[in-house]
Image (tube, rainbow, N blue to C red):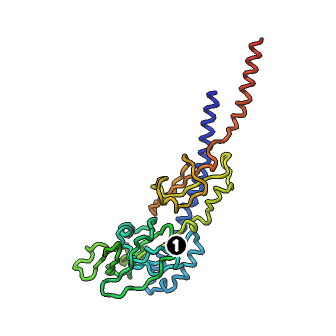
Amino acid sequence: LYNFHRSQLDFREELRASVRSLAERYAEEISRQIRMSTRSLEALEAAIKIDDAGMTDKHFDELAQSLIGSIMGISALGLAPGARLTKTYPPDKFAAVEGGDLLLHPQRGPRAVESILARATYIDEDVDTTGSPGPGPPPGSRPAEGPDFSEDRPDFVARRPIFTSYAPVYMPDSWIMMFGQNYSRQCSGADYPAEVPNCYFPGPPDVHGKATHFWGFAVMSVSFEDLLRTIDLESLETGLHRVGGFTKFSYQLSSATMTVESEALERWPHSNSSLDSEPESSFIEVPELSLHWKLCLAPVDGWEVVDPNITYVLLLLPLSALIGVCLGMD
């Protein structure tokens, strides 16, 4: 009986290890796709750095279409000179919040500034369109026309800061109105504009040793549907896999910091069947993007399966009893 109990524990651990291995395999695929998708931003950066004539802006639609079609896992691409989104392709797949000067946004601006200072791509999962700022030019000038960003809402946005030798040394004056409050940046006319917050962002020297400054962002908008199109998470629930006697699995993708009570879980990919209270998890880590997600997996019908060892136990117990009776009779 003791050996049977130990074998049951070992068998259950083997089952969980098998499911955990399946979760890890999918987590690796998701990490790989995210890294692959963000290469589109590096391609846009390379084009902008050598293009002081504005040809990238002029032919942006063709370039973006080519990148989206060849790299996959991308919903839309954009350019944001001076941290204000002006070019998108396709134009109907960006959030309304992308319309204003990102650096002035009271919630999302600080993270954008951090990425400029770190000279690193980052993922922005806070893309709620509520309270989106109205883009505003400096007081006294006419509002600049921009694309319409209100049609669609991405699940996350990736931004890569770009530094060029032909970018302005100081950021342009700008302002936005948000939540009834004015947020502004006044760099012109200052005695020491480099000391004014968010006015001066020097970059690394270019290949010719010239000084560079912040040009703006290359932007990637992504829906979970597009990101996971080649990964097919839905197959976990349809019986495509057979792992440890299980064929159908419930799943939940989320940010690593989310709890099961979080309302935001609803917008993250999940199975139609509810997730077991004790799922196996695998973390999706992309450190260079400060991205930390989690994939949870559990059998649709629960963890209980029949251990093949129990068959032998059920046969051996009555046989042992019979032998004991026979020995007693002797």
Asked if one can make out residue 254 in the rendered structure from this viewpoint, the answer is yes
Q: What residue appears at the point 51 percent right and 76 percent down from the top-left corner?
A: 151
- Dividing the picture into quadrants, the one containing residue 102 is bottom left
| Residue with the mark numbered 1 | 40
Where in the figure is residue 244, as x and y percent of width and height? 66, 46
User: Would residue 138 appear left or right of 129 to someone viewing this image?
Assistant: left
User: Would residue 176 appear left or right of 309 to someone viewing this image?
Assistant: left
Which corner quadrant holds the C terminus? top right
Image position of 143 with respect to 300: above or below = below
Q: Which residue type does callout 1 highlight?
A: Ser
Residue neighbourhood size for the residue with mark 1, other residues' Cα within 10 Å, grouped as few (<14), some (14–19), many (≥20):
many
Q: What residue appears at the point 67 percent right and 53 percent down from the top-left corner?
A: 241
Asked if one can make out residue 114 in the rendered structure from this viewpoint, the answer is no
Which corner quadrant holds the N terminus? top right
User: Would residue 324 appear left or right of 142 to someone viewing this image?
Assistant: right
Q: What residue appears at the point 47 percent right and 73 percent down from the top-left corner?
A: 95
Judge by depth and name the residue closer to the eye, 218 or 321. 321
Where in the figure is residue 149, as x and y percent of width and height? 47, 77
Image position of 270 with respect to 153: above or below = above
Judge by depth and name the residue closer to the eye, 52 or 81. 81
Q: What residue appears at the point 52 percent right and 63 percent down from the top-left corner?
A: 267
Where in the figure is residue 58, as x and y percent of width and height? 49, 86
Where in the figure is residue 319, as x and y percent of width and height? 75, 24
